[in-house]
């Protein structure tokens, strides 16, 4: 009786105007707290976006301003807008020639990274053997080494590796496009294997088992079944690797001595003068150099986003 009485009293009290007012206040407080968290999150994201985009916006703005006008009026002034910086950077910096050098390095490097990385990932993900985990750890831990620590041994090895004269004017792997390609391949391959192996593990094993029953060999399973299903991941990785290899400055500067062979990012330093540097023309050159990566991202945007969100619904 006591329990039922107290329960009935609680039910009656819950229906009173005072109780309803308390519940409404609690609901409003929860809604206010959720709104405050949402606003704080949005403000934080906007702040990060502004901080991230400010240098790029300033570089684009500076690229349209005349150097003499800026020196006279100051960096924070307005006016002095011109397109001559882009014309001068294009001709003085010889950007078309160095852009071709970047293409000769970036395209083979990305193709080799994706081809070798997908083959290694297929073996690690689809076959069970004793050194499966050890092989994956070798690829992953190779990315933990700072590239600068390996510069001296790579320099000696590339100079000691002979090549015929029709492949290298220096007679070795040093000062060649292949040297820069191999360096980028070695340091990007581990990330490619790690991502693709995880992606391939999510694919049903029944696909390859059915193909094996039908007589398909390992390479046919890889090329005709698994690889087409990895298109989103391959597109995302192709976008990343094309950006990373194209924007690389270190390896070309360290492993090349002939300035005419430099990729465009390394050759951009040729716009620096002996006694002063036209920072506005440098900004124009940097914008021109950055345009190809923006175009690559726009072309592969749909596949890139699909590759980044792979497995999000698992």
Image (tube, rainbow, N blue to C red):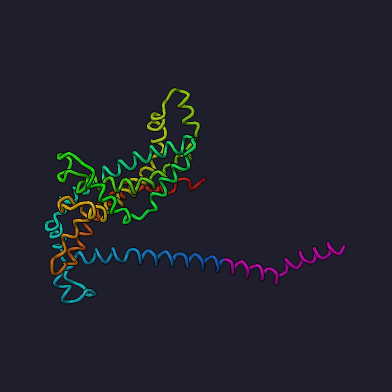
Predominant SS of the magenta segment = helix
Q: Say left or right for 139 vs 179.
A: right
Q: Position of residue 183 (x, y in %)?
A: 29, 48
Pick whichever, 260 or 155, lies toward us.
Answer: 155
Q: Say left or right for 258 vs 137.
A: left
Pick whichever, 247 or 38, lies toward us.
Answer: 247
The image quadrant that residue 259 belongs to is: bottom left
Res 114 seen here: yes
Residue in view at x 13 percent, y 54 percent = 94
Residue in view at x 86 percent, y 64 percent = 2
The quadrant of the rendering that contains the N terminus is bottom right
Q: Which residues are magenta?
A: 1-30
Pick whichever, 164 or 190, lies toward us.
Answer: 164
Vertical order, 305 against 40 (above or below) = above
Tell which residue pokes out farthest to the right in this image.
1
Q: Position of residue 80 (x, y in %)?
A: 16, 70
């Amino acid at each position: 009786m006591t329990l039922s009485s107290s329960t009935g009293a609680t039910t009656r009290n819950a229906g009173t105007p005072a109780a309803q007012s308390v519940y409404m206040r609690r609901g409003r407080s929860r809604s206010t707290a959720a709104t405050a968290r949402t606003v704080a999150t949005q403000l934080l994201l906007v702040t990060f976006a502004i901080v991230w985009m400010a240098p790029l916006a300033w570089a684009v703005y500076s690229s349209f301003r005349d150097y003499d006008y800026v020196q006279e009026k100051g960096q924070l002034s307005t006016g002095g807008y011109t397109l001559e910086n882009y014309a001068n950077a294009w001709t003085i910096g010889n950007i078309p020639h160095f852009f071709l050098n970047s293409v000769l390095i970036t395209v083979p490097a990305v193709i080799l990274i994706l081809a070798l990385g997908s083959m290694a990932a297929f073996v690690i993900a689809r076959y069970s053997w004793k050194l499966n985990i050890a092989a994956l750890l070798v690829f992953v831990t190779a990315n933990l080494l700072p590239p600068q620590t390996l510069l001296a041994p790579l320099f000696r090895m590339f100079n000691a590796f002979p090549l015929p004269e029709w492949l290298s004017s220096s007679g070795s792997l040093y000062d060649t496009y292949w040297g820069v390609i191999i360096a980028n391949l070695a340091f990007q391959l581990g990330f490619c294997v790690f991502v693709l192996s995880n992606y391939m593990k999510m694919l049903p094993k029944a696909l390859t088992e059915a193909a094996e029953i039908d007589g398909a060999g390992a390479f046919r399973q890889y090329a005709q079944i698994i690889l087409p299903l990895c298109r989103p991941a391959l597109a995302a990785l192709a976008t990343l690797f094309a950006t990373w290899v194209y924007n690389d400055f270190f390896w070309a500067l360290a492993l090349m001595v002939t300035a005419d062979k430099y990729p465009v990012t390394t050759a951009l330093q040729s716009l620096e003068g002996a006694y002063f540097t036209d920072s506005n023309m440098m900004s124009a050159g940097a914008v021109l150099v950055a345009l190809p990566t923006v175009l690559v991202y726009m072309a592969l945007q749909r596949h890139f986003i699909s590759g980044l969100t792979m497995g999000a619904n698992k």
